[in-house]
Image (cartoon, rainbow, N blue to C red):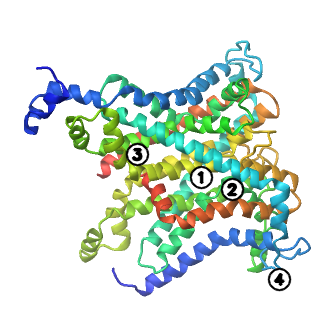
Amino acid sequence: MNRYRKRTFVLELAMIAVALVVAFPVYVLVNLAVRPVSDTSSPIRPTTSPTLDNFSQAWQQGGLGGALLNSVLVTAGSVVIILAVSSFAAYPLARSTARWSRGLFLLVMLGLILPFQLAALPLYQTMRDLHLLGTPWALILFHSGLQVPFTTFLYTGFLRALPRDFEDAALIDGCTPAQSFRHVVLPMLRPITVTALVLNAVAVWNDFFTPLLYLSGSTQQTLPVAIAGFFGQYVTDWNLVFAALAISIVPVLTVYFVLQRSIISGFAGGLKG
Amino acid sequence: MPATSRDQLSPPAAVVPRRPGRLSGRRRATSPWWFAVPAMLLFAFVVLVPSARGVYYAFTDWDGLDPNSSFVGFDNFTGLLDDPDAVQAVWHTLLIAVSVTVIQNVFGLLLALGVNSLIKTRNVLRVLLFAPAVITPIVTAYLWRNLLGPSGAVNSLLGTVGLDSLRQDWLGDPQLALWSVVGVIVWQFGGYSMVIFLAGLQSVPKEVHEAADIDGAGPIRRFWSITRPLLAPAFTINLMLSIIGGIKLFDQVYALTGGGPGHATDTLSTLIYKDAFTLGEFGYSIALAVVLTIIVAVASTGQYLVLARGERAAS
């Protein structure tokens, strides 16, 4: 079963066919985004006169540059906070056997189940009262809290599987708990941090429901909401919409293809958490 | 003996485990409770407190503005039972969650088995097939909205290959729209399931397969007796992710159909959004959110119990 047989070749062809079907929408996306508005032939026929006009027009009219910047800011800010507070919280949750620790862990598990739709509306009121609506801060705050249960859960599971001998040794050598966390535990958390980073960054970057609620009517949109707004405005002008969609996909796919090894293992790493 | 850190240095390490009382005292000190405070404050502010308020508001006529709403008992919930749109939305939510879970995992497992073989393109295909999963769902949904339109690329493709009879108004036909939404989700996240199954498959040692091969077990028998039990953890994660994702579904429906045609594809999440922000019925909307919460809780604990038993049986 370790040889490349005729059956393997058939499987190879079948898998390539599946991949082509999966990639088909992206082909149409590029094809429509680069063809001039005057070209009204079938969407699957490759255009004969490609142009980048749609891109410059979409970029200027959609305010996509500002939205891109906001998305980067919100994602980076949220992810840094999420990783910091969750790895900290996981340490006592994984190591302490006290009753409060077990109770807190159950609370975190409860947070895994609660859908954000339940908290979204009352929190909308709070954000409004704090004058945070319409600012990226509302989103950073929201994601930082929302992702705590899942990320803490990942870190706690990982820490529980780590031997504590190193920490005990550090303590015996006179480290304070904070020093032992900083110099002994934190370096060992690298693999799970990659997973947590990838999963959280993708979740925050792609989120649509929250910015739709908390940034509605504001000029400070994130990319998904800007795209939805753009679609509403140019619904009949598909070439422009496709250019805008392509613009929003390019940075994501670029990062993905460059870092595909860590990203895929990050997604698969949730398995061990 | 006073336990100062200086004393800790003097006894040989081998002595330490024989003093459990003292060691556990030190161990408790290694997990300072205040490490958890920032995370728990954020968690309480964003999730716990608003969720508790949400449950309370579900029993009031809250309008989203006035904090002094009045208590109306179960009115919102009985209203929900009399509202055909709400009952339909619950049904759509369950239908989408179950069909996405089944189709996406079968598709993902087949893809994983395919790229876990000896084919030469396996690495390229793995990267390609997973790619849709990282793209923003709202963006892929707008893309598919065009592709699935009456004169969109899907119908053009069917026409080109001579299958004109299969051309459909994929999103405009109330009978079909829900299944189109399911199809788009499977397209996007099939690769996600694949990656998780693949990690499970790669944990199966090659030697086990080779031994079974020598013993005369065919590919199906090998899959059933060796691979399947070892894939149990991957199944747990995949089923959990797809069923909960399906129940909470919002973005794709919002962008593909807006819940239409009519209410043919409305899910609990889109209805929650519409009732609150287009109709201003916050109390009613949050009652729907409570129903959603109950469904998620029942589905995830039920699934956890069933699959945990399966995993134990498999191992």
Q: Read off the residue under disc 1.
A: B99
**Quadrant of the image occupied by residue A174:** top left
Point out the frontmost of discs 4 and 1.
4
Toward which corner of the image does residue A60 lie, by quadrant? Answer: bottom right
Residue closer to the observer: B136 or B103: B136
Q: Amino acid at mark 2?
A: Trp
Which chain is mark 3 on?
B
Query: CB under 8 Å between callouts 4 and 1?
Result: no
On the rendered structure, is B19 left or right of A213? left
Q: Amino acid at mark 3?
A: Leu
Residue A191 appears left or right of A36: left
Q: CA distance from mark 1 to mark 2?
A: 9 Å
- Answer left or right for A242 relative to A70: right
Q: Quadrant of residue B164?
A: bottom right
Mark pair 2, 3: CA separation: 27 Å
Q: Disc 4, disc 3: CB below 8 Å?
A: no
Q: Count all numbered tags in the image, as a single digit.
A: 4
How far across and how far down the image is residue A99, in percent?
Answer: 33, 23
- Asked whether the beta carbons under mark 1 and mark 2 sit within 8 Å of each other, the answer is yes
- For residue A5, above or below residue B295: below
Residue furthest front in the image: B6
- Check disc 2 and report the residue beneath it: B179
The residue where tag 3 is placed is B307
Horizontal arrangement in the rendering, residue B228 relative to residue B114 (left or right): left
